[in-house]
Structure formats: C-alpha cells, structure tokens
Amino acid sequence: MEVKRTHIDSTDRAFTDTMHIEFLDSNKYVMRKAGGFIYKGKYSQDGNELEMGLFNPILIEKKFGKLLMKDDSSYYFFMADTSKLVIGNKEIKNGQIVEPILPVNSIDQMIGHWSVYRRTSKAAMNEVDYTRVIKMIDITGGSSDGKLGYLYAAKDPDGAPSWSIKSFSAGLLECVGKDNRSFTVIKCQDKEMVLQEDDMTYYFKEFK
C-alpha cells in the first residue's frame, strides 16, 4: 500500500489516488488506485525496471515490509498492507499485533482518572450539549458513601460532577445525578477505556 509520494526533488507530493499493488505467483499482479479501476496482468522485470501495463517504474529499494519505486515524475513509497493479516490467533494491523479485547468483570479493572481524548457518534450532531457530553470520569471503586466514581460533563467545574456511578454489572455502568445514565463498557485495557451510550462512543486515556 502506498504511504507516501514525493516529487523527484524529494519534496512531499499530495495525492488521493493511493495505489495498492499485490504481486502474485507466475509474475501476475493486481493494482488498484483509490477511486479508480482495478488493473490485472503480468509484470516483467529487467534489472531494476518494472513493466506493469500503464505503470512502469524503476525499483529503487526493496526490503522486508518496504518498497520504493520511481518514475519520471515521482517517488512512490510502499509498506506492506497488513490490515487483514492473521498469524495464529493474533491479528496484525499496520505491522502491530492487535490484542483481543478482554472482558471487564469488575469495577476494580477501571479504577483511575480518565479523560476523554476522542468521541464518535453514529448520528449526525448539529449541536453539542456541553452540559451532557462527558469530558472526564473518576472511578474510585468502593467508597464509604457507596459511590463507585464520578462523571464530569464538559461544563462541570472541578469538584462538582453532574453524575456519580451507582453500580457496575453485566458490562453496564449505571449512573445517577442530574438524570439517570447507563454506559456500556466496551474496553478497558492497554491504558485505554471505551464507553458507549446510545449513539455516542467515548474514548478515554489516563493522562498523568
């Protein structure tokens, strides 16, 4: 998969027609460009010169996971597209092992001071209600007042959260306060916590 393109003078070149090339047995190849057609055929190689139908680059460098080619106008930088690679029971994505999501069975697994670094919504949001959108969660676990933690909306001042966590069971955080809210715990591992409420998904990290 093409990851970078430069002019011949090595200055970066903007592009949207990202190339994907798959080299197969018997000198066959499949090449497609984002937003374009899929080309199939046979390639030939004479020294460092490749002939691939309409694309006939010079091979500059080839080593594990990396490929550099050029033509008269550009340098083309490729890396192995491992987005669908699975080795054993491990998924490999962008060259990194993706650990399976582990179940969250106890509030103790989530104890910490969590801040939102990203949020996504399945539905279009014309306006954001900052009195409800979550910015931070303090999960304390068991405490003398029976509360398991506190949720802060974007407009809540420090020390004045709008909700507290009443219970955690079967993957759900039940919260009370300004109103009742329920969050599904999607993930809590690798220093990241993901919660979902209706169409909104919140991504948290512990920022020290």
Image (cartoon, rainbow, N blue to C red):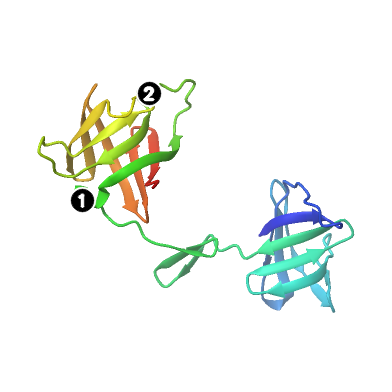
* Mark found first going from the N terminus, 2 or 1: 1
x then y, percent, for residue 121: 44, 33
x then y, percent, for residue 138: 28, 39
For the N terminus, give its image quadrant.
bottom right
Relative depth, front residue between 163 and 167: 163
Provide the residue designation for mark 2.
155
x then y, percent, for residue 153: 34, 27
Provide the residue designation for mark 1.
108
Q: Which residue is found at the position 54% from the left and 65% from the top?
A: 95
Amino acid type assigned to the residue bearing label 1 in the image: Asp
Residue found at the far right of this picture: 72
Relative depth, front residue between 179 and 1: 179
Amino acid type assigned to the residue bearing label 2 in the image: Lys
Q: Which residue is found at the position 32% from the left and 29% from the top?
A: 158
Task: Tell me: 147 left or right of 111.
Answer: left
Residue 146 to residue 190: above or below: above
Q: Identify the mark at residue 54; answer none if there is no mark.
A: none
Task: Tell me: 10 left or right of 101.
Answer: right
Q: Quadrant of residue 82?
A: bottom right
State the CA–CA distance, disc 2 to disc 1: 27 Å
Residue 54 to residue 13: above or below: below
Disc 1 crowd rating (10 Å Cα; few below 14, some 14-19, many 20+) is: few
Q: Quadrant of residue 20?
A: bottom right
Q: Which residue is found at the position 34% from the left and 38% from the top?
A: 196
Q: Secondary structure at mark 2?
A: loop
x then y, percent, for residue 60: 80, 71
Q: Secondary structure at mark 1?
A: helix
Disc 2 crowd rating (10 Å Cα; few below 14, some 14-19, many 20+) is: some
Relative depth, front residue between 179 and 71: 179
Q: Are marks 2 and 1 in contact (CB under 8 Å)?
A: no
